[in-house]
Image: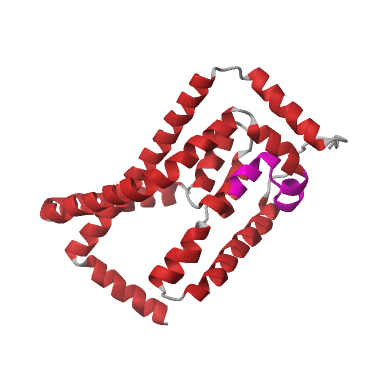
Amino acid sequence: MKTCKKHSALLFLLCILFLTLCMLLYPEAAYQGACNGIHTWATHLLPSLLPFFIAANLLISLGFVQFLGVLLEPVMRPLFRLPGEAGLAVALGFTSGFPMGAVLTASLYEQNLCTENEAARLAAFTNNSSPLFLLIAVPVSMLHAPQLGILLLSAHYAANIIIGILLRFAAVKTNYGPSHRHPHILIHAITQMRQYQKEHVHSIGLILGQAIQKGLSSIFNIGGFVLFFSVLLSMLDASGLFVILNSLFELLLGI
């Protein structure tokens, strides 16, 4: 394991040295790649993801996850071997698209609402493409075949659900204690949410401010990744390596 990490660190160092050298040799291409990355982030990701990040953080801070956890526990635990609170990541991951599933999974783990093993399995099948991307962007804009939208959507979501079910067998055996099913599950869910709110008493202004701060932190992190890979692709293109890699993969995929 240590040897593998050393080789990975060395490979990453070589990649960064290559990127830095290319940025010095092709400054105009680096600048254009950075502009393209910032434009993509500012015009597409920022307005579409930031409101969901803020709303999701508010739901977690106001105890809605505890409410949802009680309601979804009878489904999430036997089907995926995940806590009911994970249902929020499943719902938003499948409806809003990536990276909502991964961001919410990280938030649940930070709030100690799921274990490390559960977070890893949850992120594996909830970091999905959005329905609009599968129904419009790919079939209409890219493939020019609108009739393929339903097929792509069904295959994508069915595959992720199957992965989630299969990963239940990789769950760490944990003693969750006896399950005392409350006769009125809705009342029990509201009680759990109210109990959380009593234990975490904060003003609305503070809760909203923290939600916005966390949302901005997440969206800026995403922007950094978009900028990095946009510049990397520009450097591969400017150096001619993109054509070589394209030919190599074309040969492999042809086989």
Side of 195 where 229 appears, left or right: left
Which one is in front, 224 or 188? Answer: 188
Instruction: Point out residue 226 in the picture as x, y percentages from the top left corner.
Output: 33, 49
Main secondary structure found in the magenta portion: helix
Vertical side of 254 occupied by 207: above or below: above
Asked whether residue 10 is in view, the answer is no
Residue at 49% x, 59% y: name it. 132
Q: How many marks?
A: 0
Q: Is residue 18 above or below residue 153?
A: above
In this rendering, is residue 127 above or below 152?
A: above
Please report the residue visible at 49 percent of the width from the left and 20 percent of the height from the top: 205
**Lateral position of residue 211 relative to residue 44, left or right:** right
Whether residue 112 is visible to the viewer of this picture, yes or no, is yes
Residue plotted at (45% across, 24% down): 209
Quadrant including the C terminus? bottom left
Display colour scheme: secondary structure
The magenta region covers 74-91
Measured as percent of width and height from the top left, residue 16 is found at 26, 49
Q: Which residue is found at the position 16% from the left and 56% from the top?
A: 29
In the rendered structure, the answer to whether residue 19 lies left or right of residue 106 reads left
Residue 219, magenta (yes or no): no
Residue 206 in percent (x, y) is at: 49, 20
Nearest the camera: 82 or 128?
128
* 27 relative to 234 in the view: left or right: left
**Rendered position, 203 above or below 102:** above
Q: Nearer the viewer, residue 113 or 56?
A: 56
